[in-house]
Image (cartoon, helix red, strand yellow):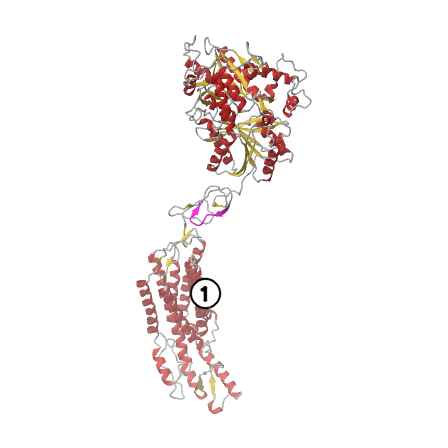
Amino acid sequence: MRMQREPSLLIMMLLLLLLLLGGPPAPVRGCDFAQTVCGAHAPGDILLGIMQPCHRKVTAVQDRVSPGAFHCSDFDLSSLVRSMAVIHEIQQVNAAGFLPGLRLGYLLCDTCSYASKALLNAEHMLAFNRSNHLECDNSDFRPAVKVVLGAQYSEVTIALAKLLNVYMVPLLSSASTSPELSDKLLHPAFIRTVPSDIHQTKAIASIMSYYDWNWVGVVYGDDDYGKAAFQSFLWDAEENGVCLSYQETLHHYLDHSQNDRRIQQVAEVIRSSRAQVVLLILKAELVELLFKEMLKTNTSRVWIASDAWSRSSAIAQMDGINEVGDILGFTFVSFRSQSFDDFLTNLTVTEGGYNFFIEEYKNLRSNCSAECGSSNPPSKCVDLLKYACDSSYSPDQKDDYLLKATDTSEPFPHRVAVWAVAHALKKLLRCNSSSCSGEVDFPPWKLLQELKNIRFEFENQMYFFDKNGDFVNGYDLILWEKHGSGRRLEKFGKYSILNNRIELDGKEFTWLSTENVSTPQSRCSESCRPGWVKKILNISCCYTCIECEEGTYSEDWDVQDCKTCPNETWSLKGYTHCRPRSEFFLRWTEPHPLTMIAAAAFGVLLLLVILVIFLVYRNSLPMKQAEVRLSCVMMAGLAVSFASVVLFMGRPTVHICRARQTMYAMGFTLCVSCILVKAYRTFLAFLPFGQLLHKRLHKLYKPPVIIVVLTSLQAVICLLWLIFDSPDVDDKPPSAQSMRKVLECKEGNTYIGFGVMLGYIALLALIGFLLAFKGRKVPQEFSETGYIIFSMLMYLFVWVCFIPVYITSEEDGTRVQASAILVSSYGIIFCHFLPKCYAALWASKSDTMENILDRWRAKSEKEDRDGATPPSERSVTLSTTSTSSFLWRSETQSTITSRLSDVSCDSVCFPPLPSRSGSVVTKRTRSLSL
């Protein structure tokens, strides 16, 4: 990643190079140059340069107009501890005799968090006790300082790296994480014992994705570190589905004139945003100022800390820190050292050297600092006095204040850096257990080569630099837990760079935002549950949720596209998975099919009972009227219809589909044909016609022929239907809104044959109904017109209702037709046969033909006395309300009575058909029975 180069920085570098190459530095006002520029020094055979921001800022930079001395302020305890960690490890290397016969020294300079000050330090380190001349080839340049450990901030480190690249002096940082420093074309002499921010931003984006935070805010510094980390985070956020609600910058220079106003503006943006998670890529000092501004309105959020402030002790102990909300952060892998803790409790200057920073710290502890003792001390000095000042403190006594006020495990990467240099020197100087045979005054670039290839073990961990000169040992994920009035750091996971994966410890903790273990939410839109997908609005994190359509599904939260169901499977709207459609047909084991089968079986059984009754009472007057043989044929047709209902159950096949319709058509047509014959007989027997017409109609009355012809016509219809448009199993695709695959019969492609078949039966029923309705006034003792009317009316009603129900019930057509067959069949039984059975079993035995005729005769005589007709034309009316009454002459009644009594049981059992040729009704010798 390329950073923009500041013109002032380039000019300063050129000036320093000219100064460095032009000769040794002159003393400053009679003072030793080293003591003027750097604050700590220890002699040694090989010097290590150390650059740390022991003070947080340079004062009045904006007023600087001449190259005068830099004045630093705001002593930083954390930087002091980091510096002491490096010095401690150097002493450990020397004490262990790791480099036999050699002693490491150091030169510690304060950068004051300012790049120009760091460049001045570098110029001093390279020229320390040396005389340099301008040369074209610097391969043999041998400064006293062979390696520089630092700096803290990437902005400063980048400036140093550009200068040290000229002489290939190794710059080994343990805190600067800018991705630009991994570019070996720009910074070939830079290496570091921490990972690049490329990995840190991946870890941050991963933890946001893990907790389902996709709507976040970012505040970063306008220095090289902040800009580079922010750009890297943008790429990783997009990959993890994280969107930015806002992005704000703060000036990295603490004394900037617009800092206070800018912090207020950023705080207002944070308050007004719906984003509950805020990433802060800032220096610890800026974070502290921002938190103080947020506390003014009691605003809390979930804060994610970059490595620049994730271990800041000053922020962890600031007033009101428990009110700002939850704080998560990523830190470098670290371990605590007991020997280092002991070193901090008894800070002493290395023998033969000096350390002004220890002296300044002890002065602060005893409140003897001239700066903090002034009438108007700076804010940071006030904080130090509040926490560090102790009137009982003695510089000579052991003091554990640094152990309490700072995190002594934080400088672990700095300790690792010292041992990396020690291992590289051991290899470069060819050291064995007793001595080192290599040249001590070597060019720094040789040490750089060894550092890049070194592999060593420290604290039971293996360390090495990758091809970019970075460590890849990952990060620790920490939570700032409440601890009294402050916070303490609690590790609850880690991020593996090699696997790009977050591994949590699994323990639950209480979030301050929710006051329980449930995770705070920070989303632009609510999550889309499985079965739904996102419909993106303006940006990818803001969307509406819509259901997956039929045939598609989604099984995860917040997916953008529905998956298509595999073959032989299906899904409905909002489904989370696909499954095979269930096959639906009238199974034998289901309640409704069992009910219909039982109804059909009961119908057949009932027909058998009726048949027995008809045969037993065949000589009774009701059975003679019903005509036993014709009724038996009707029963056979109804039995076939009942049997066809059974074929509507079970898994349909092409043969079953054809057989069930054919059985019903033939059986019911046979039954209706017999009913039509009965209606026609009554029509001929009792209704008046002209003589010629009567003879013609009488010739047509041939019951066997009529029944055979009518049934045969239905057989022809069924045959043509089976040939040209045969029923088959319906292969139509199921409805998209149904998870059932209905297995049913399709009554042909056009349904013409099915319609003609039903229409033919309906036509026969209608004709029979009309004939019976015409003769409805005939006394019931001699006809069945009432039974025929009601049975045919019920049939027509059922099948008229069947048509719309069948058409609209796509999945229940089979059930509907089977039910219609049962109802119409039972209609004929209850309206036609059961009344006859009742009459045969329980009717009065006195209802003989003579008694019936006597009742008619008495009725007729009563009408004669009332003067209904002239005596010469006195008659008996068989039907008192019929418009076509059948008149019999009164003088022939005795003859009719005697002749009707002679009608055998094999005859029609009706009064004989009248003769229009004479006035006397003669007995019809031809039987009208079947």
Where residue 165 sits in the image (x, y, percent)? 45, 22
Q: Which residue lies furthest to the left in this view?
A: 723
Residue 547 drawn in magenta = yes
From the viewer's side, name the closer residue of 317 and 674. Answer: 317
- Assign the N terminus to one quadrant of the image: top left
| Badge 1 element | helix
Inspect this view and state whether residue 410 appears: no
Q: What residue type is labelled 1?
A: Cys
Looking at the image, residue 860 lies above or below residue 54: below
How many numbered badges does the structure rendering display?
A: 1
Quarter of the figure with residue 687: bottom left
Residue 437 visible from this viewpoint? yes
Residue at far right of view: 375
Query: Residue at (57%, 37%) from the top-left corner?
Result: 276
Secondary structure of the magenta portion, mostly?
strand
Seen from this angle, which residue lies furthest bottom? 872
Mark 1 lies on residue: 801
- Report if residue 268 lies within the magenta region: no
Instruction: Residue at 44% x, 30% y: name it.
Output: 499
Percent from the top left, x then y, of residue 584? 41, 53
Say which of 174 and 61 sits in front: 61
Whole-percent x, y for residue 881 in the image = 49, 81
Q: In this view of the protein, which residue sits in the foreground, 912 or 46?
A: 46
Which residues are the magenta region? 544-553
- Residue 233 point in image, percent of width and height: 49, 34
Whether residue 855 sits left or right of residue 611 in the image: it is right
Quick check: 159 left or right of 681? right
Horizontal arrangement in the rendering, residue 118 relative to residue 671 (left or right): right
